[in-house]
């Protein structure tokens, strides 16, 4: 009986920790998205948020990583005057997070997998915003105009998240706290 109660207490503690970390990554995603907002030709903006979206996916796993990855940047859009982008950002960034996390798990959490997963997730971002911008403008050519700025954002997010994840993976403490990494 005592062992069962101890297991339940541990499970509640782990769930609480995961919820708190998800909230933290939502806040980090918001801050990383808003700290540097460079307007793009399509009416959106380039930012540093993809770094946190990908890192959150690797640390939190597919479900919580997708929630954090979608909600933080979507809040940045909402509060930053880009309300029209909120639904697209929520879906695109959540898809980035779930894709990166599931692919990382499928590739057995190898170091090289971080690069592959990041490229796959960033491709979702580039294509997603291209299609959404084309939809908003009423023609795909307008969406295509945003590809260069989205590729720049993708390259930075990919590089920064990969380097940070590789550094964090070296820490036994971090790996214990975030078994998804």
Image (tube, grey):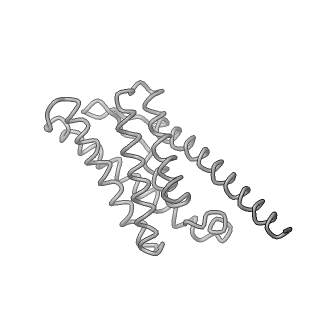
The residue that appears at 17% across and 35% down in the rendered structure is 142
The residue that appears at 37% across and 35% down in the rendered structure is 87
Q: Position of residue 60 (x, y in %)?
A: 55, 57
Q: Please, is residue 86 above or below residue 115 in the view?
A: above
Between residues 107 and 31, which one lies in front from this camera angle? 107
Is residue 18 left or right of 108 when viewed as pictured? right
Q: Residue furthest front?
A: 1
Q: Position of residue 167 (x, y in %)?
A: 55, 66
Is residue 38 left or right of 179 when viewed as pictured? left
The residue that appears at 26% across and 37% down in the rendered structure is 132
Is residue 168 left or right of 158 when viewed as pictured? right
Number of dots carrying numbers: 0
Residue 143 location, quadrant:
top left
Residue 43 location, quadrant:
top left
Q: Quadrant of the C terminus?
A: bottom right
Between residues 81 and 15, which one lies in front from this camera angle? 15
Q: Residue furthest right?
A: 2
Q: Position of residue 147 (x, y in %)?
A: 23, 45
Q: Quadrant of the N terminus?
A: bottom right
Q: Position of residue 165 (x, y in %)?
A: 52, 63
């Amino acid at each position: 009986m005592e062992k069962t109660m101890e297991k339940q207490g541990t499970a509640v503690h782990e769930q609480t920790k995961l919820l708190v970390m998800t909230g933290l990554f939502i806040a980090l995603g918001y801050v990383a998205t808003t700290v540097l907002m460079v307007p793009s030709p399509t009416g959106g903006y380039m930012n540093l948020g993809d770094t946190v979206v990908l890192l959150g996916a690797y640390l939190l796993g597919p479900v919580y990583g997708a929630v954090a990855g979608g909600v933080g940047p979507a809040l940045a859009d909402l509060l930053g005057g880009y309300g029209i982008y909120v639904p697209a950002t929520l879906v695109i960034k959540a898809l980035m997070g779930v894709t990166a996390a599931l692919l990382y798990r499928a590739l057995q959490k190898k170091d090289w997998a971080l690069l592959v997963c990041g490229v796959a997730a960033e491709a979702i971002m580039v294509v997603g915003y291209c299609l959404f911008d084309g939809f908003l403008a009423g023609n795909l050519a307008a969406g295509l105009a945003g590809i260069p700025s989205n590729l720049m954002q993708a390259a930075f997010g990919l590089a920064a998240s990969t380097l940070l994840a590789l550094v964090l993976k070296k820490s036994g403490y971090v790996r214990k706290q975030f078994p998804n990494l």
